[in-house]
Amino acid sequence: MQNFGLPDMGALLLAVDGHYRTTRDLEWLRSVAPHIAAAGRWIIRTRAKAPTDGMMRGLIKYRPYCDYPEPTYDYYADVYCCVGLEAAADSLAALKMTGSAARFGREAQAYRADISVRWTWRPSVSAE
């Protein structure tokens, strides 16, 4: 049984960054850095399997939660994962993990661009 859905990965990264921003506890952040990096890499790896064109370009098709049995595209989950990846980049930058921070930042920027296409994409319509 799956009880950890896609939105949770982004929400988790956002919460970790929020905890650090609130406490400024670098020691704690350092202790969870391997988990931050693993979660960010998971988002990047999973997104690499996404369509490369069309309306769903760059979006993750995933089973969103344990009570939704079929994989689907979930705008909410993608937004959370994108913002979580941005937060992970900020957290890793605070630890001077500049390589990973820069990679996550670039990936998040590309992710945000793919999500933003949803607001401007229009299917081709023949003018007959």
Image (spheres, rainbow, N blue to C red):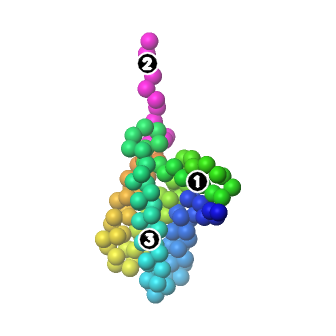
Report which quarter residue 94 is drawn in.
bottom left
- The structure residue drawn at horizontal position 42% and vertical position 51%, both measured from the top left corner, is 49
**Residue 52 placement (x, y as % from top left):** 38, 44
Residue 83, percent from left and from top: 49, 60
Tell me the number on the disc at residue 32: none
Residue that protrudes farthest toward the bottom in the picture: 27
Residue 63 is labelled as 1
Q: Circle 2 sits on which residue?
A: 126
Q: CA distance from mark 3 to mark 1?
A: 20 Å
Q: Secondary structure at mark 3?
A: helix
Q: Quadrant of the N terminus?
A: bottom right
Badge 2 density bin: few <14, some 14–19, many ≥20, Cα 10 Å: few
* Residue of label 3: 38
How many numbered marks, from 0 up? 3
- Upstream in the sequence, badge 3 or badge 1? 3
Q: Is residue 75 visible?
A: no
Residue nearer the viewer, 36 or 21: 36
Q: Are marks 2 and 3 in contact (CB under 8 Å)?
A: no
- Mark 2–mark 3 distance (CA, rounded to whole Å): 46 Å
Q: Amino acid at mark 2?
A: Ser
Q: At x 41% / y 60%, what residue is drawn?
A: 44
Looking at numbered disc 1 in the image, what kind of residue is underneath it? Arg
